[in-house]
Image (cartoon, rainbow, N blue to C red):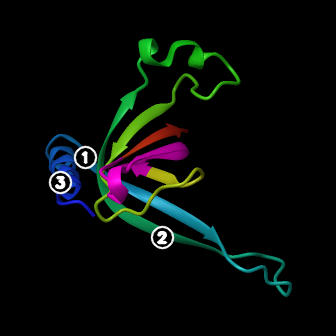
Amino acid sequence: MSAFYDDMAATADELLREYGKPLVLRQVATGTYDPATSTAPATQVDFPGTGTLFDFALQSAGQAFSGSTLIEVGDKQCYLSPVGVPLPTAGDLLVDGTDVWQVKNVKAINPAGTPVLYELQLRK
């Protein structure tokens, strides 16, 4: 790992802590199917993190706001610090106080193998 990108990740985390807010990344994994109970128990793991939420800008989204496209009206854009948080995946949940958002898309800013920032597309 590069010391430069480690410093960039630390700077991004510092800025998100100063100007962002606490968020929780929730990963839910389905366990092994139990034929005796006909269920597959789910386990939930919460990772406290820091980030910011924004509405997608009309200019940057363009036609993506029409139905059946990648970005829909009401979706949020989240910048999440990777410090203490694993790489999110589509289907994970992001908890913001009482609001729970589903992760639809993830873009990891990961130069030289060092995660600096996660950019998420969220939907209720």
- Pair 1/3: label in front: 3
CB-based contact (under 8 Å), mark 1 and mark 3: no
How many numbered callouts? 3
* Residue 43 found in image quarter: bottom right
In magenta, the rendered stretch is 95-117
Tell me the number on the disc at residue 107.
Answer: none
Q: Earlier in the sequence, mark 1 or mark 3?
A: 3
Nearer-the-camera pick, 58 or 1: 1
| Residue 110 is covered by the magenta coloring | yes
Tell me the number on the disc at residue 4.
Answer: 3
Q: Mark 1 is on which residue type?
A: Lys
Q: Residues within 10 Å of mark 3 (few under 14, many from 20)?
A: few
| Residue 104 is covered by the magenta coloring | yes
Q: Which residue is mark 1?
A: 21
Q: Mark 3 is on which residue type?
A: Phe
Q: Which residue is mark 2?
A: 45
Q: Give me the residue at 51% from left, 30% from top.
A: 75
Check disc 2 and report its element: helix, strand or loop.
Answer: strand
Q: Position of residue 12 (x, y in %)?
A: 21, 47
Q: Residues within 10 Å of mark 1 (few under 14, many from 20)?
A: some
